[in-house]
Image (cartoon, rainbow, N blue to C red):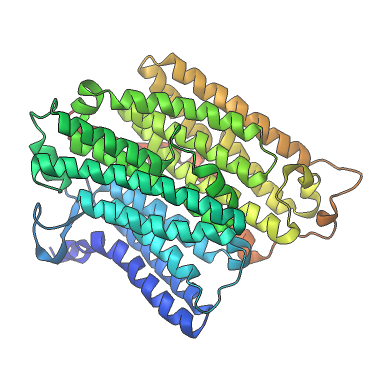
């Protein structure tokens, strides 16, 4: 009983630690500019440790629950930490830790300064993401959606004039998405009189055909689809990810959009229920179709790019399509593939954006054609890119192969041959633009770009996170069977079984 009491506070401690650290970092930043980074590193490392403890402690049969201020649900706000939430908490905390450890100059394009809340904003973003993961209350989830969104708008704008415009555009679409979600939650409240997810799920029984409930379902899915940047609601993403500082782009691509995908999984299957979203209103079929379309669209658009970060941004559109397709197929195997790809993409895409930051710091180069011969001057950076690129294509033994393989099997299991063809075609398209970069960086041109002539590897502060992420992509691939069998299969079975499938 005492051991259980030690972890009962984890659901609220995970977001609260980051939120408190954001306030502390803002205060100490007024005294010493670099102290805020130290606070951020300590907070994210501590949060990651707590997330690991949560993952090892919680179970589907006995999740951790916390009633905020002692008010029991459905009146009070409830925090819930089950295996799905613990898994997502680990992903958020891991990438947050890597980004705060990564040096600020290549990561954010500037050094911390007094009265410039750089790391407080990063911590606020992470606190909002963690709050979405922990919340079992639909309105409280909206509050955390807005917390991380506001921090994101500010962080994106740090990339310069174009980033400021991209941030404003992102703000517009983010506000529309939030508005749709909030109206949908309002419709559910008018119908059920509750905001607690578990309570609403029990009250929706027998209301499958209720027009207000169906409208709420549509609004919430569209709102979260905008937050997730699922095709064709992705229009804010390419500019925001292209022009944001590399560390910010890594956060956005690796975890921010994935948390919205998590919210879609949680609300579709555990609030509305499997029957409603697959039979009454075939929302899952729509998600699968748009996911497949996004896979092809993002891959084709990535081929057309000459700007390295913009190529990565469109690649993210395609990678999110895999997750949307896995959710839409709504089978245990497909959901396993989607959740595995959440972690795989978080590792490889954050690695690639941090590589972009390291290259920009040493050379100022963003354009792909100017990278010819890069491996001669920055061989370790080139090797890390090679590993992450192989994962993006889906080449074994990287984790990218296995997430695509499970999704391919899930598509064939459902007889969705078209989706299986899309997955295979996308891998070939990805191979096309990744090979183009391989050919350039490993070529031996007669003359290097002047910016590369005197270039060298970035310092250990840049290279250690990059190499660690590249190694993690391979290690995750090697141990994929253990992760799937011991962790993801029980999560997927629990989510779909709890929804009544």
Point out the image quarter for the N terminus. bottom left
Res 193 quadrant in image: top left
Point out the image quarter for the C terminus. top left
328 w.r.t. 40: above or below: above
Using the image as rendered, state which of residue 235 and residue 291 is in the foreground.
235
Res 438 quadrant in image: top right
43 w.r.t. 424: above or below: below
Residue at position x 33%, y 47% from top? 178
Residue at position x 39%, y 40% from top? 226
As drawn, the residue found furthest toward the right would be 446
Lateral position of residue 460 relative to residue 32, left or right: right
| Residue 398 screen position, x and y as percent | 55, 38
Whether residue 191 is visible here, answered yes or no, is yes
| Residue 416 screen position, x and y as percent | 40, 16
| Residue 57 screen position, x and y as percent | 25, 55
Res 186 quadrant in image: top left
Residue at position x 9%, y 38% from top? 202
How many numbered tags mark residues here?
0
Whether residue 52 is visible here, answered yes or no, is no
Lateral position of residue 48 relative to residue 434, left or right: left
454 w.r.t. 273: above or below: below
Lateral position of residue 478 relative to residue 46, left or right: right
| Residue 163 screen position, x and y as percent | 57, 54
As drawn, the residue found furthest toward the bottom would be 31
Residue at position x 19%, y 61% from top? 8
């Amino acid at each position: 009983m005492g051991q259980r009491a030690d972890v009962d506070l984890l659901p609220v401690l995970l977001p609260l630690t980051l939120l408190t650290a954001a306030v502390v970092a803002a205060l100490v930043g007024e005294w010493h500019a670099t102290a805020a980074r130290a606070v951020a590193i300590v907070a994210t490392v501590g949060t990651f440790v707590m997330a690991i403890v949560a993952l090892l402690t919680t179970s589907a049969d006995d999740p951790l629950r916390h009633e905020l201020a002692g008010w029991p649900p459905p009146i009070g706000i409830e925090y819930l930490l089950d295996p799905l939430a613990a898994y997502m908490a680990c992903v958020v905390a891991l990438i947050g830790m890597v980004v705060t450890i990564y040096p600020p100059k290549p990561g954010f394009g500037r050094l911390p300064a007094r009265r410039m809340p750089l790391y407080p904003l990063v911590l606020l973003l992470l606190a909002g993401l963690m709050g979405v993961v922990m919340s079992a209350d639909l309105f409280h989830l909206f509050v955390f959606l807005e917390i991380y969104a506001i921090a994101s708008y500010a962080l994106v704008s740090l990339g310069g004039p174009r980033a400021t415009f991209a941030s404003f555009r992102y703000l517009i679409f983010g506000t529309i998405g939030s508005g749709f979600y909030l109206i949908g939650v309002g419709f559910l409240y008018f119908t059920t009189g509750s905001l607690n997810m578990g309570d609403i799920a029990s009250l929706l029984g027998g209301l499958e055909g209720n027009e207000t409930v169906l409208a709420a379902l549509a609004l919430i899915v569209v709102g979260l689809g905008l937050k997730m940047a699922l095709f064709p609601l992705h229009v804010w993403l390419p500019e925001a990810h292209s022009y944001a500082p590399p560390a910010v782009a890594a956060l956005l691509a690796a975890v921010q959009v994935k948390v919205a995908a998590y919210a879609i999984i949680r609300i579709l299957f555990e609030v509305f229920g499997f029957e409603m979203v697959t039979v009454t209103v075939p929302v899952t079929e729509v998600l699968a179709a748009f996911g497949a379309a996004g896979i092809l669209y993002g891959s084709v658009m990535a081929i057309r790019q000459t700007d390295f970060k913009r190529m990565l941004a469109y690649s993210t559109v395609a990678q999110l399509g895999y997750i949307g397709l896995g959710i839409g197929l709504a089978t245990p195997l497909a959901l396993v593939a989607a959740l595995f790809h959440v972690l795989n993409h978080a590792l490889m895409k954050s690695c690639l954006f941090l590589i972009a930051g390291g290259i920009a710091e040493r050379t100022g180069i963003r354009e792909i054609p100017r990278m010819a011969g890069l491996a001669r001057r920055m061989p370790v950076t080139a090797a890390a890119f090679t590993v992450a690129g192989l994962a993006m294509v889906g080449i074994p033994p990287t984790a990218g192969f296995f997430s695509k393989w499970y999704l391919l099997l899930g598509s064939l299991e459902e007889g969705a041959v078209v989706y299986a063809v899309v997955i295979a075609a996308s891998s070939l398209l990805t191979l096309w633009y990744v090979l183009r970069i391989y050919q350039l960086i490993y070529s031996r041109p007669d003359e290097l770009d002047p910016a590369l002539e005197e270039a060298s590897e970035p310092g250990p502060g840049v290279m250690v996170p990059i190499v660690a992420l590249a190694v993690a992509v391979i290690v995750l691939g090697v141990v994929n069977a253990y992760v799937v069998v011991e962790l993801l299969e029980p999560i997927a079975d629990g989510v779909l079984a709890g929804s009544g499938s």
